[in-house]
Structure formats: structure tokens, C-alpha cells
Amino acid sequence: MQGACLGVFCGIAQPKYFLESLQALGAQIVASSLLLDHQEITEEQLRAFALLCMEKGATTIVCTEKDWIKLPKSGVSLPLPLEPIKMYLHILAGQEHWDRLINNIKDRI
């Protein structure tokens, strides 16, 4: 990510942390489209955003995997590459509570 000029879109509850994570990796965010949590981006919106990103010097558009899987299965033709960013969760405190929560969910499935 070091030095990458990115356009970023996402529909997550706390987009600030996603953007900060990309910047911490050395990316320069030249444009962003921050949707409401779970809101999907339309093909028309994505194309317009891609053009804006190009105008601002982006070389790639990135989004969360959560947003990536909502895109049309046939793909969207864009003037820039679109890549999902894989995120990982690291529990820093309360591991026992987290494990109980996950086990309760697994029991219900």
C-alpha cells in the first residue's frame, strides 16, 4: 500500500477505522464514498465514483470484502481496477468472552 493513490468506498458502521488502516499502511486516499452501514453501491454510482477517482489521480479503487461480495456477480466494467481489502480481527482483551460468544453462535447454527 505504501505510496498507492486510492479511491475507497465502503458501507460499514465505522468507516473511519478502515480509512485510517489504509493510511497507516502508507496509502494516499484521494477520494472516498462512505455509504451507510450495509448500504450497497449501485453500478451507476460505482462508475461515477471511478471516474472521480481517476480525475483525482487514483490508480486503484478498494473496498471491504463485505462490500465486494455485494457487487454484481457478472462484474462491473470500470476504468480502474477494483480490489477488496481483507481485514482480520485480533482480540486484544476479553478473549474468554469472545470465545463464549462464538461458541453460542455456533451452537445456534
Image (cartoon, rainbow, N blue to C red):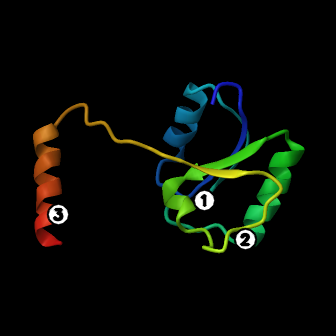
Which sits earlier in the primary sequence, circle 3 or circle 1?
1
Instruction: Report which quarter residue 3 is drawn in.
Output: top right
* Amino acid type, residue under disc 3 in the picture: Ile
Q: Which residue is the site of mark 1?
A: 35
**Which residue is located at x 52 percent, y 34 percent?**
21
In the rendered structure, are the residues bearing label 2 and label 1 in contact, judged by CB atoms less than 8 Å apart? no
Which sits earlier in the primary sequence, circle 3 or circle 2?
2
Q: Callout 3: helix, strand or loop?
A: helix
Q: Which residue is the site of mark 2?
A: 43
| Mark 2 surroundings within 10 Å by alpha-carbon count, few (fewer than 14), some (14 through 19), many (20 or more) | some
Q: Which residue is the site of mark 3?
A: 105
Mark number displayed over residue 82: none
| Mark 3 surroundings within 10 Å by alpha-carbon count, few (fewer than 14), some (14 through 19), many (20 or more) | few
**Which residue is located at x 49 percent, y 59 percent?**
66
* Amino acid type, residue under disc 2 in the picture: Glu
Closest to the camera, between mark 3 and mark 1, is 3
Q: CA distance from mark 3 to mark 2?
A: 34 Å
Residue 67 visible here: yes
Residue found farthest to the front: 74
Q: Callout 1: helix, strand or loop?
A: loop
